[in-house]
Amino acid sequence: MTTGKLFILSAPSGAGKTTLLKRVMADLPGLAFSVSHTTRLPRAGELDGVDYHFVSRDQFEAMGEQGTFLEWAEVHGNLYGTSRPALLAQLATGVDVILDIDVQGAEILRKSAAIPAASLFITPPSLQELERRLRGRGTDSEETILLRLKNARVEMQAVLDYEYLIVNDRLEQAIDTLRAVVIAERSRGHRLPTGQAIEILGEL
């Protein structure tokens, strides 16, 4: 069985990556979402084991000491980590896995080169638009919004470290671009847009 491809995806909070991912994953078969562990509290509508594995700080730190995490980082005062066994098990089934992580975690994975991956960064058209989107959500306090904007300025300086940059200005165009990246990476791995391996029949 063909091993799946890992896609590392980063974006400032509010850039719209969740919307993009849901649309592309609904369109393309063979894509799975890597569910990270986090110490932050669930937002309205989020489900444990679906959006994140929500754990206490003590639980998270114990998992870290056991070497469970492929990468982990503290973002906005909360811990986030990727389970190495869970990710490898997903890839072994042949599905492509999208790993939604911050720039710190992405840098750790690039430097370790533990798992070959394509890296993508999604950015809003401007910081002003990002602020408008964050305030429009109506889910964060003023303090949290200001912190996210401050961190976004730092995160967006890392765009040149990523192979692909997608500006989420026009939603449909951004969706088409993300879909095209996935298909292109599958083609590079001698696979069909569906993710299935291409079988070459006969002699060349």
Image (cartoon, grey):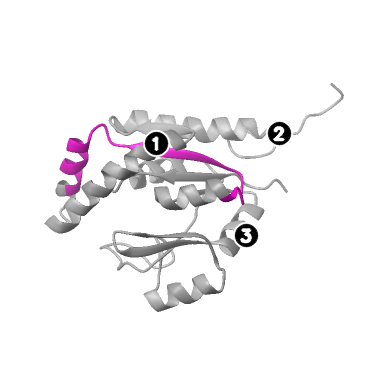
Q: In the image, what residue occupies the spot 34% across and 38% down?
A: 157
- Look at label 3 and name its amino acid: Ala
User: Hey, which quadrant is residue 43 in on the image?
Assistant: bottom left
Q: In the image, what residue occupies the spot 57% across and 58% down?
A: 87
The crowd level at tag 3 (other Cα within 10 Å; few <14, some 14-19, many 20+) is: few
Cβ–Cβ below 8 Å for labels 2 and 1? no
User: Hey, which quadrant is residue 48 in on the image?
Assistant: bottom left
Q: Earlier in the sequence, mark 3 or mark 2?
A: 3
Q: Earlier in the sequence, mark 2 or mark 1?
A: 1
The crowd level at tag 1 (other Cα within 10 Å; few <14, some 14-19, many 20+) is: some
Q: Is residue 55 above or below residue 3?
A: below
Q: For this view, does 79 lie left or right of residue 13?
A: right
Which residue is the site of mark 3?
Answer: 89
- Which of the pair 136/77 is nearer the observer? 77
- Span shown in magenta: 112-134
The crowd level at tag 2 (other Cα within 10 Å; few <14, some 14-19, many 20+) is: few
- Look at label 2 and name its amino acid: Ile
Which residue is the site of mark 1?
Answer: 159
Kindly identify which numbered label has been placed on residue 198: 2
From the top left corner, tell me how far across and down residue 98 is, in percent: 49, 48
Q: Is residue 94 magenta?
A: no
Q: Is residue 50 above or below residue 165?
A: below
Q: In the image, what residue occupies the spot 52% across and 44% down?
A: 7
- Look at label 1 and name its amino acid: Val
From the top left corner, tell me how far across and down residue 135 is, in percent: 15, 48
Q: CA distance from mark 2 to mark 1?
A: 33 Å
Q: CA distance from mark 3 to mark 2?
A: 23 Å
Cβ–Cβ below 8 Å for labels 3 and 2? no
